[in-house]
Every structure is written in structure tokens, then in C-alpha cells.
Amino acid sequence: MDVQLKRGLLDVCVLAAVQTGPSYGYQIIKDMQPYVDISESTLYPILRRLEEGRLVSVRSAAHNGRLRKYYSITPAGQQRIEEFKGDWLQLEAMHRFITKEGDHE
């Protein structure tokens, strides 16, 4: 898969993982696991990029004597998910064109 395409897809998957409420790294990986194989070394750079882009916000809270970062989706992050849904329709159309699905000769 194209690296840039995969990167964009993973960004949206991480946004979807925090869409229902604040979550932390290990939980995000667990939630994504049935659908996407993602490691900590992949996840944390994505979370930093999403935070820098203001698509997620971060807060720290104590948990078992350690600080844990909780990530929440922002309105801009929610908007990115909505944009992705529209983009996906275009990708499906391109796929049909490339594979000639639906051609009736």
C-alpha cells in the first residue's frame, strides 16, 4: 500500500478510536486491534501529529501512581472523519474504474 495513503488512513482510524470518548494509547491499540494491526511505535507519532494538527486534544491524569495521557477528538478531528467519508466514496469510484467493475460490454 502507498505509504502516504496508509498514513492518512491510520490517522483517520485513530481519530475514530477516540471519537466516542477520551482514551489512552494502550486502549486505542486494543480498540483498533480487530480491524488494524498497529504498534505503539506507530501509534504515538500519529497521536503527536494529530495533536499538532489540533485534531485531538490531550490531558494528563494520574493512574496507579503514574501519569497517563488521555486523547480526545476535537471538532476539527470530527470534521476530518466526515471529510474522509466523502473521500472514501471517491476512492470507491476510482477502484471501480481501475478494476472495471460494473462495465457492461
Image (cartoon, helix red, strand yellow):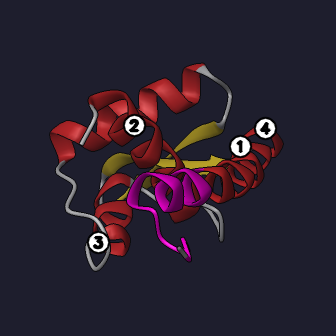
Outermost residue toward the top? 52
Q: What type is the residue that disc 3 sits on?
A: Lys
Few, some or many C-alpha atoms within 10 Å of disc 4 (few <14, some 14-19, many ≥20)? Answer: few
Closest to the camera, between mark 3 and mark 4, is 4
Where is residue 59 shown, x and y percent of the image? Answer: 58, 41
Q: Are marks 3 and 2 in contact (CB under 8 Å)?
A: no
The residue located at (64%, 38%) in the rendering is 57
Q: Which mark is residue 76?
A: 4
The residue located at (28%, 80%) in the rendering is 34
Q: Is residue 63 left or right of residue 97?
A: left
Give the magenta range.
91-104
Where is residue 73 shown, x and y percent of the image? Answer: 67, 49
Closest to the camera, between mark 3 and mark 2, is 2
Earlier in the chain: of badge 1 and badge 3, it is 3
Q: Nearer the viewer, residue 70 or 28?
A: 28
Q: CA distance from mark 1 to mark 3?
A: 22 Å
Please say whether residue 29 is one of the residues in the magenta stretch: no
Earlier in the chain: of badge 3 and badge 4, it is 3
Q: Which mark is residue 80?
A: 1
Where is residue 62 shown, x and y percent of the image? Answer: 43, 52
Q: Are marks 1 and 3 in contact (CB under 8 Å)?
A: no
Earlier in the chain: of badge 1 and badge 2, it is 2
Please say whether residue 93 is one of the residues in the magenta stretch: yes
Q: CA distance from mark 3 to mark 4?
A: 24 Å
Q: What type is the residue that disc 2 sits on?
A: Leu
Q: CA distance from mark 3 to mark 2?
A: 23 Å
On the image, numbered disc 3 is attached to which residue? Answer: 30
On the image, numbered disc 2 is attached to which residue? Answer: 5
Q: Nearer the viewer, residue 61 or 44?
A: 44
Where is residue 58 shown, x and y percent of the image? Answer: 58, 38
